[in-house]
Image (spheres, rainbow, N blue to C red):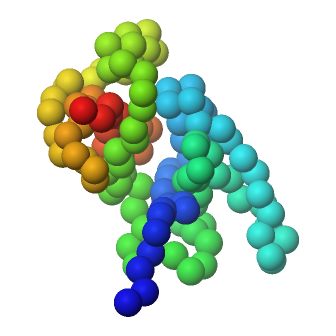
Amino acid sequence: MASVTALDHLVLTVRDVETTAIFYRDVLGMTREEFRVADGTTRVALKFGAQKINLHQAGAEFEPKSHAPTPGSADLCFLTVTPLADWQAHFTGLGLGVELGPIARTGATGPITSLYIRDPDRNLIEVSVRG
């Protein structure tokens, strides 16, 4: 049977691409990258590890797109090796409130401990350590 092996990228539909890119860069340490696609247009992605998040401007999404692209509808969990206490201090220093955590959860490969914040579109962002 055929099966997939990894997640390459996902798409976030956002109200403002640049505001989102700045947030994910400053808050989560991702890298903003512009890339060209076959039709010659330039798009924006956020890179981290071996993955990326492509950003689509709400109302001007690229085709094909999800059935109902909506800013604020995502719930994303990111893994880190940085202690959550350091993340809490980082979030506090940026004036971001932690919505929940640290709290024990279950990740794809076992137990994780998580903090929850919101991005500019109110997407739920979970930052987690394994174990």
> In this orientation, does residue 18 appear?
no
Which one is nearer the viewer's eye here, 94 or 52? Answer: 52
> In this orientation, does residue 42 appear?
yes
Give the quadrant of the N terminus. Answer: bottom left
Give the quadrant of the C terminus. Answer: top left
Going by the picture, which residue comes out furthest to the bottom?
A: 1
What residue do we see at 15% from left, 33% from top?
104
Q: How far from the left and from the top, in percent, is residue 112?
A: 24, 37
Going by the picture, which residue comes out furthest to the left?
A: 104
Which one is nearer the viewer's eye here, 126 or 5? Answer: 5
Report the number of discs: 0
Q: Is residue 16 above or below residue 119?
A: below
Q: Is residue 131 above or below residue 83?
A: below
Q: Is residue 27 left or right of residue 97?
A: right
Going by the picture, which residue comes out furthest to the right?
A: 40
What residue do we see at 28% from left, 50% from top?
109
Which one is nearer the viewer's eye here, 114 or 43? Answer: 114
What residue do we see at 59% from left, 36% from top?
30
Q: Is residue 45 above or below residue 89?
A: below
Which one is nearer the viewer's eye here, 14 or 2? Answer: 2
What residue do we see at 80% from left, 76% from top?
38
Q: Is residue 40 above or below residue 71?
A: below
Q: How far from the left and from the top, in percent, is residue 130?
A: 30, 35
Q: How far from the left and from the top, in percent, is residue 123?
A: 35, 46
